Amino acid sequence: MPENSPLVLTDARIVLADRIIENGWVAVVDGKIVELGEGQAPEAGMSLEGDMLMPGLVELHTDHLEVHIEPRPKVDWHATSAVVAYDAQIAAAGITTVFDCLRIGADRENRDREGARAIRVANTIASEAERGNLRSEHHTHLRCEVCSEDVVRAAENFLERHPVGIMSLMDHTPGQRQFRDVNKLKEYYQGKMQLSEDELQKFFNDRYRMHEMYAVPHRSKLVEIAKAHSVTLASHDDTTVEHVDESCADGAAIAEFPTTVEAAEASRKAGISVMMGAPNLIRGGSHSGNVAASELAGNDLLDVFSSDYIPASLIMAAFALPEHSSMELPQAIQTVTKAPAETVGMSDRGEIAIGKRADLLRVRNHETPVVRTVWREGQRVL
């Protein structure tokens, strides 16, 4: 972003990494925090009137863009309109750095082969960012369905055109990982695709066949591609210790939504960051019937939150986390700021400290935290 005028924010409850300054101020020059303190600021500035000042949120996994691109089954909405609307919702949720989930690997229909739609969407995001039309900073999280026939070529096609920050390895074969409970998978697909029993069984049989053919060789090739491009690797829905062992061998840095305490414990022991969905915590459990985020938090097995499919849930989960764990609020807020930033090697953001990027939120918290103002690199974007 371009250099901007100095900014001084005063009369704020400032959330640092280890404590809260009850009445403090922050000075920003050229998009970076240059000074902060407690009490009266050395010069006049913008009063936050006692509201909280906290770091901008860092989102590593949100597929909310999908509902803007395809608001109804088989409806491809105008790409620029979808991206700009999605970006506005992301910023309004307090997310200043976002990894947009783009899915590759054709499913039951062949209309989107070899990552064509993901490339089209990424083209739009890049062009709108170049024009200065986006509020948040966007990166790509490529979600790779390993059992798809075309997923390897799709990954290669995408990386020829766009950088990728995260690649996740997914296997949604019925009876495994997220959908160990096949009845839950039936509910999901019948609700999403309105399939009859016969159509659903045919779909399941196709997935079993594709798993047998592609799961092992495609996972191996995708890991090779990620390493060649220095992409952070994430494993999706690990359920068993064996799954985690495989993730370790692959060099995964993130365990996305482990479905059991066993898998979360093994990931933590292996030094893999455990990510859980914020909606899981807010709703009181997993919509797929898997382990609750609150249980992992209570056992000190949760490192990072993702908003998954509801952007507004991210800040809500951070503020709710102390009720479910031994964390105080500053530590809880790290699960949506500093911890995700460090997981992907972004050491320049995620906390209010001298020298860090001035990605900042003004938040008013009564029963529910409300994002009132957003700055990215010192520029107000909301």
Image (cartoon, grey):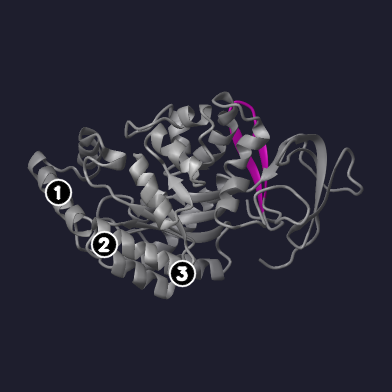
Q: Can you identify the residue that label 3 sits on? A: 229
Bounds of the magenta segment? 360-375
The image quadrant where one finds the N terminus is bottom right
**In this view of the protein, which residue sits in the foreground, 231 or 98?**
231
**In this view of the protein, which residue sits in the foreground, 40 or 287?**
287
Q: Can you identify the residue that label 1 sits on? A: 203
Q: Residue lying furthest left in this view?
A: 198
Residue 84 in the image, given as x and y percentages of width and height: 49, 58
Which quadrant of the view contains residue 283?
A: top left
How far, Cα to Cα, is label 1 from label 2? 22 Å
How far, Cα to Cα, is label 3 from label 2? 19 Å
Q: Can you identify the residue that label 2 sits on? A: 217
Q: Main secondary structure of the magenta part?
A: strand
Label located before the other in sequence (1 or 3): 1
Q: Is residue 232 above or below residue 309?
A: below
Which label belongs to residue 231? none
Label located before the other in sequence (3 or 2): 2
